Image: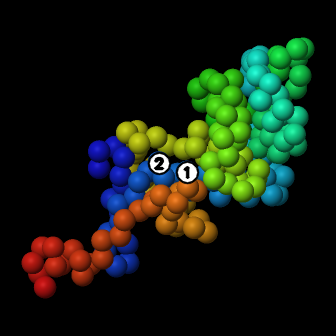
């Protein structure tokens, strides 16, 4: 629906699933598990990227370097403000890896209402790696997203607390269509 919502049938009615919020939840939980188990899915870059970090980014990288490495970023100093990026989390491999790295650092620095650095880091990857609203998904992609959401520990909300889905019970549908 509107290349944003997935309509799915469940045991007691139907669900409208916000594809971005749902995928954020899926990615958030996956990244948190990878950080906790120290098994990030890093994608090596064919061509390393040089990024220049401002003082805030450098301080964040210095204080949270182990966590950032644990996310799957392979980054090392390259003189002055320059850093060479040799790998990124697999979810961020598409697009501009340097900009994705800077965006993740920005999101981590903002905090986003999360108490721990682990949660900030996982949210920043989820935010930048999630399927966007407006992206047309295939039937298989919608089914897979729905299955992954069902497996989440907290499937009803995105990491910020927005609903991932709206449930319309069979009884509600019957009332709306005058069948009861």
Q: Residues within 10 Å of mark 1 (few under 14, many from 20)?
A: many
* Residue ID for mark 1: 24
The circle drawn on residue 5 is none
Q: Is residue 26 left or right of residue 105?
A: left
Q: Position of residue 131 (x, y in %)?
A: 50, 43
Q: Position of residue 141 (x, y in %)?
A: 46, 49
Q: Is residue 63 left or right of residue 31?
A: right
Q: Position of residue 116 (x, y in %)?
A: 75, 55
The quarter of the picture where residue 80 lies is top right
Q: Residue at x 84, y 52 (%)?
A: 38
Query: Are the residues flagged by discs 1 and 2 in contact, CB closer than 8 Å?
Result: yes
**Mark 2 element type:** helix
The circle drawn on residue 20 is 2
Q: Residues within 10 Å of mark 2 (few under 14, many from 20)?
A: many
Q: Residue at x 41, y 54 (%)?
A: 18
Does any portion of residue 93 appear in the rendered image? no
The quarter of the picture where residue 11 lies is bottom left
Q: Is residue 66 left or right of residue 4?
A: right
């Amino acid at each position: 629906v509107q290349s944003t919502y997935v309509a799915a049938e469940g045991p007691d009615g139907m669900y409208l699933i916000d594809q971005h919020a749902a995928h954020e939840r899926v990615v958030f939980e996956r990244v948190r598990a990878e950080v906790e188990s120290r098994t990030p899915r890093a994608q090596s870059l064919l061509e390393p990227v040089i990024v220049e970090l401002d003082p805030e980014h450098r301080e964040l990288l210095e204080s949270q370097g182990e966590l950032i490495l644990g996310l799957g970023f392979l980054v090392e100093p390259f003189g002055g403000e320059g850093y060479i990026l040799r790998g990124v989390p697999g979810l961020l491999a598409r697009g501009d890896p340097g900009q994705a790295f800077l965006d993740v650092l920005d999101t981590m620095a903002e905090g986003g209402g999360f108490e721990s650095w682990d949660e900030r880091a996982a949210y920043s990857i989820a935010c930048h790696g999630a399927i966007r609203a407006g992206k047309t998904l295939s039937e298989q992609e919608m089914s897979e997203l729905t299955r992954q959401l069902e497996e989440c520990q907290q499937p009803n909300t995105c990491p910020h607390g927005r609903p991932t889905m709206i449930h319309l019970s069979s009884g509600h549908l019957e009332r709306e269509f005058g069948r009861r």
